[in-house]
Amino acid sequence: MKKIEKKYRILILGASGYLGNAIYKELCMYFNTYGTYFSPKKEFENNKHFFHYNVEEDDIYEILEATKPDIIISALRGDFHAQTIAHAHIAEYALEHGSKIIFLSSANAFDAYSKYPSYETDKTLSHSIYGHFKIKIENMLMRMPKRQVAILRLPMVFGANCPRIQEIKQLISEKEAVEIFPNLIMNVTLDKKVTQQIHYIINRKKSGVFHLGSTDLVHHDEFIQQIISNITQTKVSLKQVYTTNEDRYLAVLPKYNILPKHLQITSDIVLKELQK
Ligand SMILES: NC(=O)c1ccc[n+]([C@@H]2O[C@H](COP(=O)([O-])OP(=O)(O)OC[C@H]3O[C@@H](n4cnc5c(N)ncnc54)[C@H](OP(=O)(O)O)[C@@H]3O)[C@@H](O)[C@H]2O)c1
């Protein structure tokens, strides 16, 4: 029988969302796992491990006091200013109680650099509001003791019927164009690989900055067209979006904080999984 090791109390902020919920499902068998949701939904309202939370109105401290987490995983979206305040409170709580924070950041922390892919120790710089916000939280967390923080920089995450694929299916069914970015070179990953990576980071008490993208790079247009060809054989209208004349990288490659081989991924594996 599988050993159940409920040794940590874990709170996932945004546990009703795409990634937060996948992480909840991965961890809840093994740990005392709690989560927050925002949009009213019976499934969460009836679950004693779920707490309603509105980042713009509620004090996260109350949920922290109620759940007493050893590990807080931040998988939130919502107003950036409110999220910044919430993360400051989370950091304060973590410092006081010795908890660990796992923050889902993004390749957008590097979106101002377009000429190269980015590695864990590279300086972050962003031209987007979203990227700026991620950098601000990262910098706040990096001031904490290193062992208490894991910053996970994610590229575009895919999975069977993930929101991105649902959106593509919707556009196809409405005979609308699907946007592709021919100049964009990126890496990608799978939701189920991200959840396994997080489980490993928790079990092995890993910390620091992780680049959780595939070890290879893909062109956005080719990758999306391969996904489309899995969905339909009929011709789909495409809208080519050129943001610059030159190739632009938005890729978070792992180099220094490497996970074991079975937790690494390539774009081929992502595509194969999506074909199932
Ligand atoms: N998905 C990706 O490809 C990707 C790539 C890079 C980084 N990330 C990062 O990963 C994290 C999770 O992304 P996701 O794609 O899983 O997002 P998502 O599906 O939109 O989930 C967002 C979560 O935040 C909650 N939320 C939204 N507005 C809120 C508010 N005002 N107050 C409190 N909670 C609120 C949602 O609650 P309800 O669902 O209950 O409304 C949901 O639980 C984000 O921080 C994102 O930046 C994601």
Image (tube, rainbow, N blue to C red):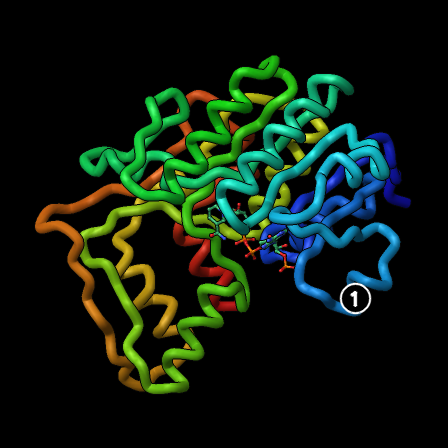
Is 125 drawn above or below residue 270 in the view shown? above
Q: Residue lying furthest left in this view?
A: 245
Is 140 drawn above or below residue 234 in the view shown? above
Q: Is residue 270 left or right of residue 216?
A: right
Q: Residue lying furthest front in this view?
A: 57
The picture places residue 62, in percent across and down from the top left corner, at 79, 38
- The one nearer the camera, 214 or 208, is 208
Residue displayed at 91% across by 45% down = 1
Mark 1 lies on a secondary structure that is helix
Residue displayed at 71% across by 39% down = 60
Q: Is residue 49 left or right of residue 91?
A: right
Residue displayed at 63% across by 47% down = 55
The picture places residue 169, in percent across and down from the top left corner, at 43, 77
- Would you name the residue on which mark 1 appears? 43
Q: Is residue 229 left or right of residue 243?
A: right
Is 269 drawn above or below residue 172 in the view shown? above
Q: Residue lying furthest right in this view?
A: 1
Please tell me in which quadrant of the rendered image residue 232 appears.
bottom left
- The one nearer the camera, 275 or 126, is 126
Other residues around mark 1 within 10 Å, as few (<14) / some (14–19) / many (≥20): few
Please, what is the three-letter code of the amino acid marked with disc 1? Answer: Glu
**How many labels, in total?**
1
Disc 1 residue: CB within 8 Å of ligand 1 = no
The picture places residue 33, in percent across and down from the top left corner, at 80, 43
The picture places residue 69, in percent across and down from the top left corner, at 79, 32
Please tell me in which quadrant of the rendered image residue 221 appears.
bottom left
Residue displayed at 46% across by 36% down = 153
